[in-house]
Amino acid sequence: MSQRAIATFVCSAISLIGASGFARAETIGRYECNIVGTISAEPIGDRSEHSLVSYEFSCFGVAGLLKGAVYSAMHVSEWDGSQGKFLLMGGVHRSTGGFAVTQMSEGTGSVVVKDGKRLSSTSSGKALFKFGSGTLAALSGKTVNFTSKATGRDRFDLEFAD
């Protein structure tokens, strides 16, 4: 077989795998979330724009295995200007007939600010389902990726995927 034929075959196979969704991350669930109360942003004081941010949030599952579930969680992160690093984040998923507990790690975030107003924010990282029972038992012990994206004032979407 010529090199051109082998290259064509390999490219075609990769295209078919990508088109079939086999190579894509599979969504476990997606939540629509609201920050509960107020966001606490406290200057650390050692340098300009270095702060500690904390808040509680609550989410409702709108897609995937987590559809209809409620997620109650808390978040603590360290920020240097527009870049953040998660220090503590996780909570409890409650669904009809099931519970799960998530601990997020390796999370980072970024905020775009213009004229002193937050225009957008995103974050991503890894999450470990430390416990799962009932309808969410399949998640127990599973490490997944998470992403979030601001959708409005004190609102964001949160997605868990393989």
Image: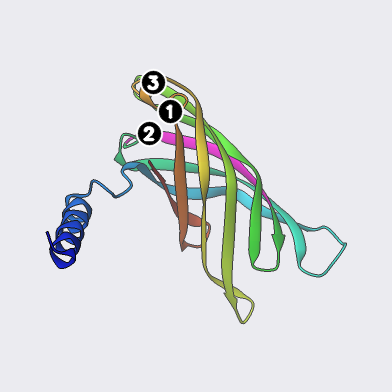
Which residue is the site of mark 2?
69
The three-letter amino acid code for the residue at tag 2 is Ala
- Sequence order check, earlier mark of 1 and 2: 2
Q: Secondary structure at mark 3?
A: helix
Between marks 1 and 2, how big is the CA–CA gap? Answer: 5 Å
Q: Is residue 63 above or below residue 121?
A: above
Which residue is the site of mark 3?
137
Instruction: Specify the segment rendered in magenta.
Output: 68-77
Q: Main secondary structure of the magenta part?
A: strand
Q: Secondary structure at mark 2?
A: loop
Instruction: Mark 1 and mark 2 in contact? Answer it, CB < 8 Å.
Output: yes
- Sequence order check, earlier mark of 3 and 2: 2
Q: Is residue 78 above or below residue 104?
A: below
Is residue 109 part of the magenta span, yes or no?
no
- In the rendered image, residue 11, in percent from the top left (x then y), is placed at 20, 61
Which residue is the site of mark 1?
94
